[in-house]
Image (cartoon, grey):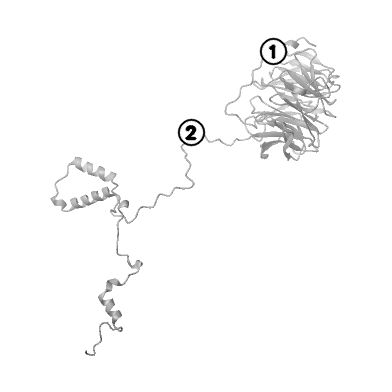
Amino acid sequence: MDSAQSPFSSSSSSNTRSSRYPLLERKRSRDNLDRFIPNRSAMDMDFAQFMIAEARNGKGKEDQVPISPASEAYRKGLAEIMNMNRTRILAFKNKPPVVKSLFPEPDTSAHQTKPVKRQRSIPQTSERTLDAPDLVDDYYLNLLDWGSKNMLAIGLGDTVYLWDASNASTTELLTVDEDKGPVTSVCWAPDGCHLAIGLNNSEVHLWNALSKQKLRTMHGHHSSRVGSLAWNNHILTSGGMDSSIINCDVRIRDCVVGKYRGHQQEVCGLKWSSSGQQLASGGNDNLLHIWDRSVASSNAHTQWLHRLEDHTAAVKALSWCPYQNNLLASGGGGADRCIKFWNTHTGACLNSVDTGSQVCALLWNKNERELLSSHGFTQNQLTLWKYPSMVKIAELTGHTSRVLFMTQSPDGCTVASAAADETLRFWNVFGTPEVAKPAPKTKPEPFAYVSRIR
């Protein structure tokens, strides 16, 4: 053999294999970038066929036969349907799915039919001011009330005046003798025709305000002045300085049908719940009692339902919530200054807010979840609160002395306040309801039996 190197020698084997078998060398995957594999599932085959046909028809346009207007319109319509804005025929991969927002835009079409509720504008000044001369400056009395017939009654010294809100006219209902007066409380019956009047000499008079006739005089039930009155249908409840609370059925001659004993000092606040089942009483002894009507009797030792001792001053301001029967708001005097909220079913205190001044009166808004309070020293203001947050909405000033009494118009919009500065002011603080509620129409039959009783 000659000395030439064998082609199978180790020195040249690698080069020979590389030159003779180049396809055996494996390429890396990242170098395979020259291939395009269409994804048929991602392609619109109808659109592709249409585009290819258009491309074929486009060649040699000079030799084409003119297309009829109908065919041209059909072609344009078909092009719109096929979405001719697209340019691609082949697709490499499927389009990514449409991402749905986790927070979709609200559907405003449903809200367009509902008018947006505007924020109520609260006038900061009273819309009307009347003189109230000889108004007794006494925290424990109740000398102002607004009846369902839109008549406002106010006790000024020995006289009771009526102010007709429909025509702004004022009339004098009665004037008592000096040995009987002054007037210490007034309260309209639910029918808006009959007015109960408490006097300093312990008597309670019942008047027909429309005919201006006194129907009866109830005496001998209290031993001192009657500073608070409250109606529960035909039952008139009176509270006196003698600490007693008496229920009288004004339809019968022997009218006393129940007594409540629990206070040690003057009863200065009385309010029946809207259901007529519970009575709240506040006294100068800092006590608040809740009484159940079903347990009232002629027995003077009737047990209370709840005896609440949280206030540290006289409890005169009382107001039942109009939309929750068992919710009561109470206000304390100058040493307490708190508004407290009670669950009268359980006796639990739900909240207590220090107002910073003497609480004289409380009124709930019948149309909104709001509470209005009137105060004494230092600002002598009316404060509107948002319930249940008890955030101050507005403070109304104008009185120069403590605002002792407040009452509400039958429609729940206007509030009248009487103060020791001998003025009576009217405030449009509760606004105008969307649908004004008509005054309840109650016939005066319960009093027909007492027209001649003295």
Where, quadrant-wise, is the N terminus in this rendering?
Answer: bottom left
Q: Residues within 10 Å of mark 2 (few under 14, many from 20)?
A: few
| Measured Cα–Cα span from mark 2 to mark 1 | 47 Å
Residue 145: quarter of image: top right
Q: Position of residue 64 (x, y in %)?
A: 14, 49
| Residue 156 appears in the rendering | no
State yes or no: discs 2 and 1 in contact (Cβ < 8 Å).
Answer: no
Compared with 67, 194 (above or below) is: above
In the rendered structure, find residue 233 and report the number of the disc placed on it. none
Using residue 202 as the reference point, say whether residue 150 is left or right of it.
left
Among the two numbered marks 2 and 1 on one chain, the one whose residue lies closer to the N terminus: 2
Q: Amino acid at mark 1?
A: Glu
Query: Is 360 located above or below residue 234 in the figure?
Result: below
34 lies above or below 308: below
Q: Amino acid at mark 2?
A: Thr
The dot on residue 113 is: 2
Identify the element where label 2 is drawn.
loop
Q: Measured from the top left, where is residue 292 in percent x and y?
A: 75, 25
Foreground residue among 194 and 67: 67
| 197 w.r.t. 88: above or below | above
Given residues 317 and 304, the one toward you in this image is: 304
Residue 445's tag is 1
Q: Quadrant of the C terminus?
A: top right
Indicate left or right for 223 with 231 as reference: right
Q: Residue at x 49, y 46 (%)?
A: 103
Q: Residues within 10 Å of mark 1 (few under 14, many from 20)?
A: few
Q: Position of residue 157 (x, y in %)?
A: 80, 23
